[in-house]
Amino acid sequence: MHHDAGPLRIEELDAVRGFALCGMLVVNIWRITDIAATDESGVVLPIRHTLSVVFEGRFFPIFSFLFGIGFALLLDSAEERSERPRLVLIRRLLALGVIGLVHQQFQPGEALLPYALAGLAILLPASALPNWAVLLAGLVGTFGVALALGGGLALAPGLFLLGLATARAGIVDTLDERGWQIAAVFALALPAAIVAGRWEYRTPYLELWSTPAVAVAGLLGALAYVTGLLLLLRIEPGQVLAEVLRPLGRLALTNYVGATALILLAAPRLGLSGSGSYAAVLGLAVGIIAVQAVCSAVWLRLFEYGPLEWVWRCVTWWTVVPIRRTRVPSRPY
């Protein structure tokens, strides 16, 4: 049997992952370039405040949730293919940690190293628990932390657990049949996200860190974005968007790290550091997404995995996995 024959990739997840990557890029540009958030008198720039409400804290939760789903799918795969499935997962997380450690030298706020550490400390032990316990811990770890501590990386462990519980409940495999459920969640999440976004926008910028406004608005915004995107992917115009987003999502690790290199190359030439030019930030984000979308699509015509994904996969399974594209559909993890 072909080593990598197995179920087709869950294409909606690739599209959602690509979408999250695009949104995180905007925030990463202003973090890496240390672009000004306030004017000379210390008043926050209105454009930054608006972009914060649209982008900041909305896409990172999606990425974290998908990481938990990916972990669950890999665990299923490892249990089928390996006598020591936990060892496969440990290798995967350690390899991610090494990539993250290198990446952190260039982007201090990066997510890969914290993801690897939280995966080892929380996801691995949780995978032995019954699913109701994982779900409960995920809800407390997400919404409890959001209310008590605020957002950012502190939300990742809870979202990992929610992703793990969601995949185990079989929801990911049956997305096709859940149109009405997704629409119902979207109908509730959208107005809630708008109300919470107004709350965040009206909170003085310097007080945001002392209130749960950012975390709550971010989570509700993420939920509205994901369910809205999943509904959009079901209609004809959404298919065009999916064609752009899926390759980005399949090469998420390569594109996430690669974007940092592109930002560091472009920022000095655009004079971004310390400036308040958010038009240049958005222009650079669009440019990077366009380059990566084209490169990812071309790459996937020739190869099964992105460069970093391939290395990561080889370490995970402790074998040299064929990278050339074959006619046999690949396993997702």
Image: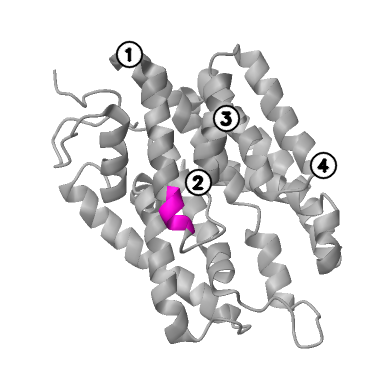
Q: Eyeballing the image, is 1 above or below 197?
A: above
- Residue occupied by mark 4: 147
Q: Eyeballing the image, is 291 above or below 15?
A: below
- Residue occupied by mark 1: 80
Cβ atoms at labels 3 and 4 below 8 Å apart: no
Residue 329: x percent and y percent? Answer: 22, 31
Label 4, label 2: how far apart the Cα atoms are: 25 Å
Nearest to the eye among marks 4 and 2: give it.
2
Q: Classify 10 Å Cα crowding around label 3: few (below 14), some (14-19), many (20 and above).
A: few
Callout 2, which amino acid? Leu
Query: What label does residue 121 carry, if any?
Result: 3
At mark 4, the secondary structure is helix
Nearest to the eye among marks 3 and 1: give it.
3
Report if residue 19 is visible in the image: yes
- Asked whether 102 falls inside the magenta stretch, the response is yes
Callout 1, which amino acid? Glu
Name the main secondary structure of what is drawn in magenta: helix
